Amino acid sequence: MRENKENLVKKVFETIVGGCKEAEKIAEEVGIPHTTVMSILERLRAEGYIEIVREEKWMIELTEEGRKYKEEGLPERRLAQYVYEKGGEIAIKKLDEVFDEPEIRIALQWVVRKEWGRIERGYVKIHEIPEKGKDEKILELIGKKEIKKDDIPIELIKRGLIKIKPKKTLIVKPIKEKFEEKGGISVITAEIIRSGKWKKTRFKPYNLAVTPPPLWIGKKNPYIEFVNMAREILIEMGFEEYKGPWIEMEFYHFDALFQPQDHPARELFDTFHVSFPEVGKIPERDYLTKVKRTHENGWETGSRGWRYNWSERVASRRILRGQTTSVSIRYLTTHKEPPIRMFTIDDCFRYDVMDATHSIQFKQAEGIVGERGITLKELFGILEEFAKRLGFKEIKFVPSYFPFTEPSCEAMVYHPELGWIECLGAGIFRPEVLKPLEIDFPVLAWGIGIDRLAMAMLGINDIRKIRRPDLQELRDWKML
């Protein structure tokens, strides 16, 4: 068994002599599992024969819809060509003779957004063929030549036409000086002793200075540790933890927070909508009626409302929640008497382009405090205490605006290396939020980007590292 292992080491050794190679390629050439190759490479690295470098590449792929548009052209391009050929003007209702209904909606949206034409009184008007944009040129080039990630227009990603995936690669680099050393054996086997070969064999000198392979002990994930530490601090401060559903209805997520149904955040490009079942059922009918009247005319809140016809169907649409304030609203529907001290730390989801500071999935810490006579000053004290217990010595507050709180503020904490970090929004729920809930005392609300604080405390400069498992980085992270 030992001899077989040494033969494999020899094969891998001979494969590397030629120059730098990816670990996956070495496994293919030698014809052994990747895990076995990694074990051998780790041994060769410890003995000083090779250097292992981790590199990250980006794979750029077309989605099924992207492949279709590459072949046929973007919907807005085909629509513009068709309208121009028809004299530059055509009734929208006649477009279904040539285009599918979903394509009409997409094409019209992008024709207007790209300023290729305009829509007036049910007609789409395009009087010249627009030049090809960067998105069309890049779409045509994919598969023909290598394209850098930074050259991809963001709209191609948001439209779901292109997928960009990170791929980690291990590059094995031979250390020339070691490979130039002459042969010899480093392991004595039973066969060498029995046959007497040891008498004529040259042995490599044993190097006591070689660092032995590291021994990795198990430990908790530092990011999970940080989140649990924040949870324990809030419980120590007298808060009750509460959970809400990831799949939420727009009613609790937007409408109950006095956000109008034409608010930009409710559009497809910012929120993940659930396709089946598309809508849910709102059980609190009396509460629903009060929210509807508040939106339409202000009801009894002292507000004029948003002055539009509120739709229950829109409010019933199901989405992946983009904030945890919906958990606060659900809590308040069943907890209407002071004092109130509730918090939640859980996942949120938003349609975004993933990079070093943005992610489609992230954790948010949300909390509310309700009591008669309480003011924003008490909220400042609570948040300052929370920040100090997390390890941030300084915190400052600046005025801000949120549609469901008034007054509102944002807070920043000071990090000795990173400086001031914007991390939370807070305020007092507006009457338009509390009155429909039949709550007649102030409720202070705050939301913290817990991932951003974790990145600062753990020395992480890329939010993707929080959820992307890299065993070596997990081993190297400091303990809290």
Image (cartoon, rainbow, N blue to C red):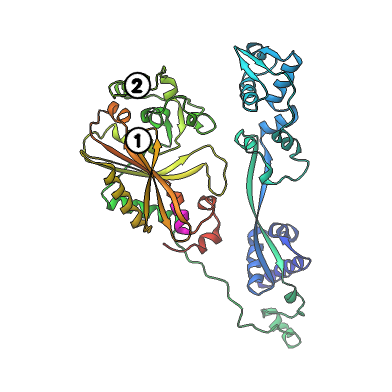
- Amino acid of disc 1: Thr
Residue 395's mark? none
Sequence-wise first label, 1 or 2: 2
Q: Mark 1 points at which residue?
A: 405
Where does the image place residue 219, in percent across and percent down from the top left? 45, 62
What segment is highlighted magenta in the picture? Answer: 453-458
Element assignment for label 2: loop
**Three-letter amino acid code of the residue under disc 2:** Arg
Left or right of residue 258, residue 160 in this image? right
The picture quadrant where one finds residue 44 is: bottom right
Disc 1 to disc 2, C-alpha distance: 16 Å
- From the image, which quarter does the N terminus lie in? bottom right
Q: Is residue 183 above or below residue 468?
A: below
Instruction: Specify the quadrant of the image occupied by residue 156.
Output: top right
Residue 452, percent across and down? 46, 50
- Horizontal side of residue 292 vs 47, given as left or right: left
The residue most toward the front is 399
Which residue is denoted by mark 2 in the rendering? 304
- Above or below for 193 versus 150: below
Q: What element carries label 1?
A: strand
